[in-house]
Amino acid sequence: MTPPGPIDHVVTSGTFSLDGGTWEVDNNVWIVGDENEVLVIDAAHDEEKIAAAVGGRRVVAVVCTHAHDDHVNRAPALADRFAAPILLNPAEAPLWEMTHPNRAPDRELADGDVLTAGGVELRVLVTPGHSPGSSCLYAPELGTVFSGDTLFQGGPGATGRSYSSFDTIIDSIREKLLTLPGDTVVRPGHGDSTTSGEEAPHLEEWIARGH
């Protein structure tokens, strides 16, 4: 049997609800580490599917890029199942409490923090805009960044809902993500991956479109 790679990926399906609306969504769940231990990034919708991908490995932490319900709805269940802490930037508290009013995250994510699983280091880049404490996780040795809903193939994450800001997300992308090496693979919370170099030339188009 081939051992798992440093990055495993499952797609889960469910709904996203905010500001009185509900939408069907497919979410990317990223599992990063080695054959012994992993970090789970964004525990969305389907605890069993995520747990099957983890297998017998130790979960170092369940990391939430942000607290929209479609990214955190299975975080407590998965954390309890694997006896792992939930990590989230504290600015996400208002959104987190909409979904989990009786359960707080276990640890705070702060800009510059380094998380490690299976010898893989992920550096926390706090990138507000899509939400107040949105965070990305950059793994230099893997040449990849897990961008949550901050940057997608084709542009920035949505900013038309509560707790979001277009100007702020543009600043975050410009300063934190487009400054990464151009071949850095951007692995978002939904949809296909891209690279920072593919997206960088379109920044001014996004700004014009956003305003």
Image: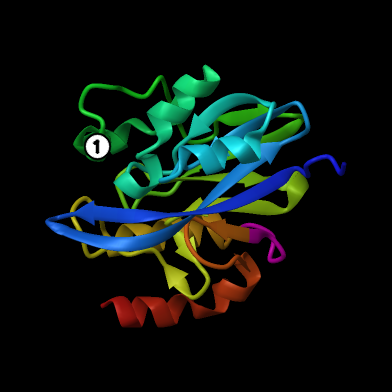
Residue that label 1 marks: 99
Residue 77, compared with residue 142, is above or below; it is above
Q: Position of residue 115 (x, y in %)?
A: 61, 29
Q: Position of residue 63 (x, y in %)?
A: 49, 34
Residue 122 is at least partly visible in this image? no
Give the residue drawn at x 37%, y 59%: 169
Span shown in magenta: 180-185
Residue 181 is at least partly visible in this image? yes
| Residue closer to the observer: 186 or 61 | 61
Which three-letter amino acid code belongs to the residue tagged 1? Thr
Q: Quadrant of residue 177?
A: bottom right
Residue 7, compared with residue 121, is above or below; it is below
| Residue closer to the observer: 27 or 204 | 27
Q: Position of residue 37 (x, y in %)?
A: 70, 27
* Residue 184 within the magenta-colored segment of the rendering: yes
Q: Position of residue 36 (x, y in %)?
A: 75, 26
